[in-house]
């Protein structure tokens, strides 16, 4: 994958993360289940970014060591 595609993926996920955070603050859910859904979506997006970062770091390290 080239850097442009990776950048687009990261920007897309960060944009959704920002939307989710703002939406949760503007329209907080009183229902515990709905609140849990909001928290779960946010957490999932953070996890996705963390996984991508780990994969990219491992790939960069492998390139340096080859």
Image: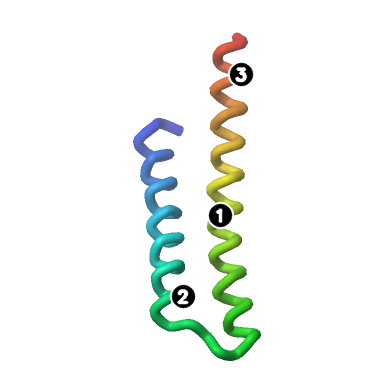
Image check: 23 left or right of 31? left
User: Quarter holding the C terminus?
Assistant: top right
Q: Which numbered mark, 3 or 1, is in the foreground of this view? A: 1
Q: Which of 12 and 23 is in front in this view?
A: 23
CA separation in Å, label 2 and label 3: 39 Å
CA separation in Å, label 1 and label 2: 15 Å
CA separation in Å, label 3 and label 1: 24 Å
The residue carrying mark 3 is 62
Kindly identify the residue that appears in the image at 61 percent across and 27 percent down. 58
**Residue 55 falls in image quadrant:** top right
Instruction: Answer above or below: position of 18 versus 47.
Output: below
Secondary structure at badge 3 equals: helix
Label 1 crowding class (10 Å Cα cut-off): few <14, some 14-19, many 20+? some
Q: Which numbered mark, 1 or 2, is in the foreground of this view? A: 2
Q: Which numbered mark, 2 or 3, is in the foreground of this view? A: 2
Check contact, mark 2 vs mark 3: CB within 8 A: no
Label 3 crowding class (10 Å Cα cut-off): few <14, some 14-19, many 20+? few
Q: Earlier in the sequence, mark 2 or mark 3?
A: 2
Image check: 58 left or right of 23? right
Q: Earlier in the sequence, mark 3 or mark 1?
A: 1
The residue carrying mark 2 is 24
The residue carrying mark 1 is 46
Expressed as whole percent of the image width and height from the top left, the position of residue 62 reads 61, 18
Q: Which residue lies furthest to the bottom in this view?
A: 31
Secondary structure at badge 1 equals: helix
Kindly identify the residue that appears in the image at 53 percent across and 48 percent down. 49
């Amino acid at each position: 994958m080239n850097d442009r595609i990776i950048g687009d993926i990261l920007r897309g996920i960060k944009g959704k993360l920002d939307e989710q955070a703002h939406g949760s603050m503007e329209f907080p859910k009183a229902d515990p289940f709905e609140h849990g859904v909001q928290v779960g979506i946010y957490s999932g997006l953070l996890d996705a970014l963390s996984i991508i970062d780990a994969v990219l770091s491992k790939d960069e390290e492998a390139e340096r060591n080859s």
